[in-house]
Every structure is written in structure tokens, then in C-alpha cells.
Image (tube, coloured by chain):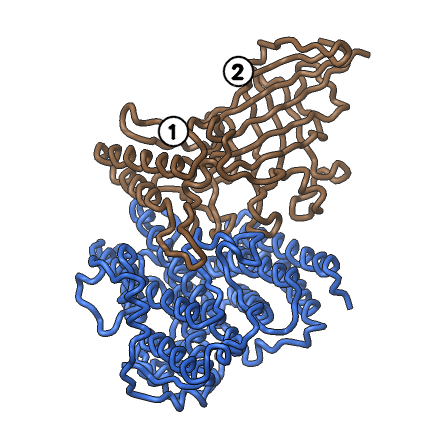
Amino acid sequence: MTVELTTREDLINTLHLAAELEHNLMCQYLFAAYSMKRSTSEGLDEVQLEKTRGWGSLMTLVARQEMEHMGLVLNLLSAIGGTPYFQRPNFPQREERYGKLNIKSELTRFDKETIRRFQGFEAPHPEPGPAFCATRGVAREDIRALLLAPQVYTQRPAEAATARGAQTPHKIEFTSIQDLYVSLAAGFVAVVERIGEQSLFIGDVKAEIWGGPGTPYGEGSMDDLSQYGLDLIQVVDLKSAIDAIVEIVEQGEGILAPPDYIEHTHYCIYTNMLNDMLDEKPDFDAARPVVRNPLTRMHPDITAPREANIITRPETREIASLFNLTYETMLLMMLFLYGSSPKTKQQRVDLMNAIYFPLMTMFIRPLSEILTQLPAFKDKRGNAGPGFELSKDMLILPQPAHIWSEFQKHFDILAWQFDNLWIYELRPESDDIVKRLRYMAENMRRLADDWRSHWKNVGMGE
Amino acid sequence: MKNMWLYLSFEGYFQMRMATDPDPSDEPRGVSGYTFALAGEPDFDNLVHLQPDEDGVCERRFGYGKNDTGPRVGVAVRQARWYDDETLVYSEAPEYLGARVSFVKAQLTERNGIVIRNDLFAIDPLRVQLRKKRGALVLDREDFLDPNTPDLPITQANSEMLERRQPQGLTSNSVEVAKATGLPDASNDSCINNRRIRQRNLEELLKHTRNPVERAALQTRISQLNILRRWWELSQGGKPIDRRAHQLTLQAYGWAVDINGMVHVNKIGADENTNWPLSFWIGGWDGDALCAYISGYLSIPFKSGM
């Protein structure tokens, strides 16, 4: 069942929805991964700890690939003249938020119920039998043929095309993520047939971020993305657009996956993980006692407020706020990176050098892991976690002439906040969490100084 | 005044138990990278261990029986010579053969792009010790990032200071590394073959292992050794060799630091007012063993002969 997409606007609106969903799932997967226990001092024996670490490795691989999918969607958007899209409603959201897609948006710790939910997100449709993950898939060329074959449409996405906005739930007719991408592939073919390839692919290809051999961002890890299980395709025409979509559906649902890849698809990773968990003793709990949807405050766009847990422990709340500010800074930088406002190659490299490794790996993740170790409440049990909260007006960029100094301001504020956390007064310097925060404080100061010096080096002064 | 130099050529495997990106650099056990503190092993200490008896070294088995072959930690002087810069004559210094070199609490630091980018790790702190073959400590000197601010943390170092502690560059498929570590050649095929042999040896070891903790650790290592080429069909061409294999012949070359700081021990009368040039390369990183090879020179000046 596919939804018919016939115009550039249809494609752009559907790609915005795809970006929102990839972003949403990535946050859910990361939340679960960061809730996992990391030491035998948390009640695991050595074998259980090894098992937990293995599950954690897979969870983070899948989350990385969700980031990659989001990157591919952003490249598809850029290629056809769309704008980058980083919005999504705050957690938690009722299932109805995404219509027939049945995506429950909530942040929950790693357990069987959570993995079963994730398995459902990634499930091929119709859902295959239990032997699916042990079977071989189909060849890559067959996948292209399937995607390019004439489709039988059941709907036009009129509501999806007009009612965008994170605040207002809207009618979504796609029945699964697979359905959304298959519809997109068919839509790209249909629009090219109608207006021609040159007329569809009018975007600024420089706004795309892509990796692998030949990438313009070769200095660093972008020429070597496969080491991280990633492949970011540059989209310039119909063939590369279909390649990008094929990659997403192969890695995710896997129903079209090529031979030997099926066990690495997200659906099979979660299926096998769940089977593994079911084989373990019932008292083996691989996750910390993290509460559902821990937030610093209630947001007006939340549609399931009763499922939110407001963090009341002040020192934890402060760190949760710091996490949110770091996350917003990263998204703001990504919005500018993917946007079409003029940038030199060096400026693009500087942005990527700040985002992809430092902000993601040295702040977002460690802060998340720390939050899952800290009590959420003053008066009851349960640990906090990263809420991935977005303020209503975030992702509004200042004028390009001021953007570099705006980022500097963000880094300087973050550096100050890392230096002045209340938890330093409550716990000894020898405390592991304090040591880790101090390490991050050092790193954020360095990042702020580095950003400042790059700014001078590239001649971006006022 | 007659000037003499003692040139010590050292080499061997060292261990460095550290997380690899995209894990954060302070990750204690490894999750999303490809190096792990396995079941039964302590957390990573991130330290460069040139000697097997240093606290924190955790050597692994590489196979069952005669197949238990792999890197063994130990960096020692392989060639020692005196050089008289008046007569320009070299002479052997056999009393230093087998002497043990250590870098005290050194780390190869990058912090995922915050301090260093592109895997050109800086070594910090840098303090060199030399022990005679029987263990007596004869030399111990540290290097300062900034001699005017000896306690300067690396996060406050400027680029000039960092470059002193970095390699000049990276060489893939280094013949020099392959020769040092015993690979038949420096090709990707040799790297992949080496990993396959290691995997087979570990599978054999697993068959003879009953301890569930050791079995869990071995199973993780065996599954990691499955990843030699990325399974994903890259859009931009080819299936590149995975870093787990590629790094067996990757060389970080051209570290050259004139050790400039405080002398803590000097039992051989070295000139303490002159810097002691240290140069080395590192390569052949074996992510399964958490070991790499180092080969270098330490040059020690003397003011008035032996």
C-alpha cells in the first residue's frame, strides 16, 4: 500500500515527515542505549555485563544508522530544493500523533517491552514469519526494480502535504515507515516523469553532506564512514535518490535487503536481541532504574502529559538542562550546516569538526549516561535520563553574518555551565560522575577556545 | 669539552587499553567502537604500557597451545652505541642492550577531535625512563608542553605545543610496520589473513575453555574479528578494508620530541642542561590485543666523555 506523491511539494513534505521520524526514533534508541548498566557494581555478573555491552553496541549502531538515514533524507531534501528539517514534537506523544504509522513517541529504558516496540518500528510490512531473520534477502538490483515498479496507490497525502508543524497532529496515511519510503521512491520516479530530472533536482548540492571516497570533507572521518557502519550518499539525480532510499529500507526493515545483510538490518537486530533477552534469566535487568520520559519541564506540544516525569532533584535537573542546551546547540549548528546560506568549505569543515565527534560523542552521550545514573526525584525512586527537549522557538537562526558569534556564545555559555554545576558542591571530587563532568568541562572550554580561534583564522570577524 | 652521545635504539610491543571512536575518549569499557574491556578484565586505563609488569597491563591469550601467538608487551633497547662528536667515531655500548624503556603514565590523546583531529594523536604526558636489563632505574626525565608552565594541561596547549607531541603523519600499508611485526607483507590481504588466523585460533581456544567469563570474552573477540571488510555496499565504490584489519599495517610516523624538562633520575652522568632527543614511530595496532609496535631512538648527551 503506497501513498501517491506527484509534486515537488509532496516529496518535500513527506521528506520532512521522514526527517522527523528518523530523528524521533534515533532519540528513542539512544535513550534506551544510554540507560544500560555499565559495571558489575550495578548488580550484573561479568557474563551479564558482557552481554549487556554487546546489546549496547548494537543499539548504538542502529542509532548511528538512524542519524545516517536522517542525513540521507536531508540530502534528498537539499537535492530538490527543500529546506533542512530538524523539528519534532517533544516526548512523550500519543500514538495517534503519527496516524497509521503507529509510532509511539516515548523515552523508555532498555527492557523487553522497549525492544519489542523498537522491533515494531522497524518491522517489514506485512510482518514476516519468525524465520525471516535467518533467511537470505534479495539482490540489490532486484530492490531497485521493486521500488521502480508501477505502484498501486491507495491515498493522496493531502493532509500530510499541508498540515506540517510540530504543534499540530495531522492525518498521516502512511501505514509504516517502509510504506513511507516506498511511496517516496515511487514519488521521485513519478515527479521526474512529469517534470523531468533537471527540473526536479534543482537544489544546492553543496548543502549536502556526504561521505566516502571523493568526499569534499575528506580531512577527518568523512572519507571513512564505513568504519562506523555508515554510508552517506550525495543525491544529484534520480538514480542517487533511489540509491539513498534503497539504503534506508535495506538497513531498516530489511525486507528488500541483499544477501548476507539481512541479519544486520534493524528489524533483525531487534528481533535477535529480543530473543536473546527472552532466553536470559528473568531477574537479569540490563538497565538502570530510569523513569519514562524524564523532562525538565512540561512542554505545550506534549500530547501524553501523564506519561512525562518532571525531574525534581535540582542538581539532576541542572544537568538535564545542560544536556538540552548542548543538544539544541548541536541541532542549530546542523541546521546551519545543511542550510543553503553561503559558507566556505572551511566553515563547513569547522561545523562538522564541532558537531560529529565532539558534540555528539564527548558531550551528548556522556551527559546522557550521567543522567541515567542520577536520581530524578527528591521524594521517590527512579533515575533521570536525557529528555531531548526542544524549546518552541529553537532552530531559528540569526543572520548569517552573526551566526559564527552566535555559536561562540553558545559554546561560552556551555563552558560556563559545565564549570559551575551544583553537583560539584554536593559530591566529592573523587566521585566518578564529578570526575566525568570535570573532564567534559575541560573539553567544552577547549572547544569554545578552538571555535574562537578558528573564527579568527578563517577571517570571519565582524 | 668533549661531547659524547649515547644512542639507544628501542622497539617492541606496548599495550594501550583505550576506547575507540565513536566511543567518548573516557569510555571505561568500550561500547560503540571496536576495542573493549572484556568480561573479567578491569576498566580501560588509557595508558601506554611499554613494560609487561606495569600496573594495568592485561595481556590476552591468542590461541590454544602452540597457537597462542600474538603481541607480547615489552619494549627494550636493541642497539646501543656511543658517539664521539669530536672524533666522529661510533662504538658499541653493550651494557645498554636489553635495557627497558618506559613512558610513565603516557596517553595517546585525541579526545575525539577536541584536542587533536584526524587520528594524529599527541602523546601526553611524556616522561621517559630507562632501566638496565636487571631493573635498576638509571634515567628518568619528563618533557613539558611549555617549559614556562610545566603544569599546563593539554587542553590549554596551543597548536605549536601540540605539534611537538604529534606524529608527522600516517602511512597505510607500511612495509616498515609489516617487517617489524612479522607480517609477510603490507598488503590488505595479509592484514585480513592475519585476522582470520587469529579468529581461528580463538575459536580453537574457545573449544578448550570452560570458564563462562572467559568464554564470554572470547566470543566477543571472535565476533569482532568477523568484521574485516565492511559488509555494506558503499555507494561511492568498493568495500574498504575495516580498521580492525587495516591498522595492522598503519604507521603513525615522525614523533620527534627533544625532552626538555625535569630530570628525576640520572645515574649515568647524562648532560641535564641539554635536551634529550626522542624519536619514534608507532604502528601495527592490534585492536584485539590492544597492543601496537613502537620503534624509536633516545639520544642522551654527555658533556665530558664517559
* Callouts 2 and 1 in the same chain: yes
* Chain letter for the residue marked with disc 2 in the picture: B
Answer yes or no: do the residues labelled 2 and 1 have beta carbons within 8 Å? no
Q: Is any part of residue A86 visible from this angle? A: no
Estimate the x, y position of residue B120 in percent, counting from the top left.
Answer: 58, 43
Q: Amino acid at mark 1?
A: Gly
Q: Colour of chain A?
A: blue
* The C terminus of chain B - image quarter: top right
Q: Is residue A9 left or right of residue B230?
A: right
Q: Is any part of residue B115 visible from this angle? A: yes
Q: Which chain is brown?
A: B
User: Closer to the observer: label 2 or label 1?
Assistant: 1
Estimate the x, y position of residue B259 in percent, counting from the top left.
Answer: 69, 29
Q: Amino acid at mark 2?
A: Gly
Q: Which mark is residue B273?
A: none
Report which residue position mark 2 lands on. B98
Above or below, A400 against A275 in this view is below
Report which residue position mark 1 lands on. B70
* The N terminus of chain B - image quarter: top right
Above or below, A116 against A165 in this view is above
* Chain letter for the residue marked with disc 1 in the picture: B
Q: Is residue B255 left or right of residue A148?
A: right
Q: Secondary structure at mark 1?
A: loop
Front residue of A52/B235: it is B235
Estimate the x, y position of residue B234 in percent, counting from the top left.
Answer: 41, 57
Q: Residue at x 56, y 23 (%)?
A: B101
